Image (spheres, helix red, strand yellow):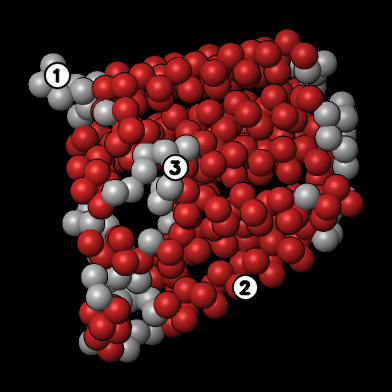
Amino acid sequence: MSGSRLHNSTESQPKRSLGERIHEYVDLVKFEHTIFALPFALSAMLLATPPHQWPSWTTVLWIVLAMVGGRTYAMGLNRLIDARIDGQNPRTQNRSIPAGRVSQWEAWALVIVSAILLTFAAFQLPLICRQLLPVAFIVLTIYSYMKLFSPLAHLVLGIALGSSAVGGWLAVTGKLDWLPVIFGWSVVFWVAGFDIIYACQDYGFDRQAGLKSIPVALGLERALMVSRVFHSFTVGLLVLFACLYSQTSVFFWVAIILTAGMLLYEHLLIRGDGKTPIRLEKVNEAFFNINGKISLGVFLLVLLQKWMG
């Protein structure tokens, strides 16, 4: 898509009310997808809190604001960097920037404000959160470029969201040890696994455009096998965490069983019929509905464990 097409598309849009503009900004960064990362960050926060204690409301507030700022920064930047590619892909050409509903300067303003929000929130948390802030920005930034030169983009996205879980732990304890790292890596492989499934939708376009992904590198069938392996790692790491964590109760084991069952259902849902390895029409249901239920389910069970403990 040419730059003039983007510009002319923007000019042709009628003036919108403030509510409509806000809706476009929310849609730009797919704010509803925060459901994937935020519950795991809050779960880690609860798991890190000593027995018979609760995190302060200010800790909860700064974690939530840091999460919202970080994810909005990453998603906004991703939409800006991918605007030209999105405009060429039939599946994504109606996104806010290529369709002209949000201008590039508006998107940049949103990215800058989000970066400021993340930075401000991190500075209200323990010192280690401030020290690791540059690392967070590096991870959140490079993801948008990874698909241009490496099929490992799925893992980088997983690291970005897994780091938020580690951050929730650090916001309470102020120190890093193996437990939050294990919990964080379970999130890394969970996210990378379902992102591989999501990327299968763009297999044909990505090959034609020269973009990198595991489906492009390995083919759909082998990519889905990698996704299954990654999700097996997720369950295994959660079991390892449960064995090492001193406050594990039956509720956390139920959370693991829930996660394993939902991930199995996810892969059964998208399984092909012999003619194709994947049912693409089921990918969105697998991507959002099932994974959203996993993150919320884990959080509610961790919350119940904390409440009953």
Q: Is residue 124 above or below residue 25?
A: above
Going from the N terminus, do you reach mark 1 or mark 3 first? 3
Which label number is shown at residue 273?
1
Q: Report crowding for label 2: few under 14, some 14 to 19, many 20 or more residues within 10 A (C-alpha).
A: some
Q: CA distance from mark 1 to mark 3?
A: 30 Å
Closest to the observer, 8 or 4: 4
Q: Amino acid at mark 3?
A: Ser
Farthest left residue? 275
Q: Amino acid at mark 2?
A: Val
- SS of the residue at dot 1? loop
- Quadrant where the N terminus sits is bottom left
- SS of the residue at dot 3? loop
Q: Report crowding for label 3: few under 14, some 14 to 19, many 20 or more residues within 10 A (C-alpha).
A: some
Which label number is shown at residue 134?
none
Q: CA distance from mark 2 to mark 1?
A: 47 Å
x, y percent for residue 158:
54, 38
Going from the N terminus, do you reach mark 2 or mark 3 first? 2
Which residue bears the numbered disc 2? 113
- SS of the residue at dot 2? helix
Q: Which residue lies at the image location 64% right of the left edge and 54% below the top edge?
A: 138
Which residue bears the numbered disc 3? 150
Q: Which residue lies at the image location 48% right of the left edge and 22% below the top edge?
A: 230
Determine whether label 1 and label 3 are within 8 Å by CB. no
Q: Which residue lies at the image location 47% right of the left edge and 81% below the top edge?
A: 105
Nearer to us of marks 2 and 3 is 3
Q: Amino acid at mark 1?
A: Asp
Going from the N terminus, do you reach mark 2 or mark 1 first? 2
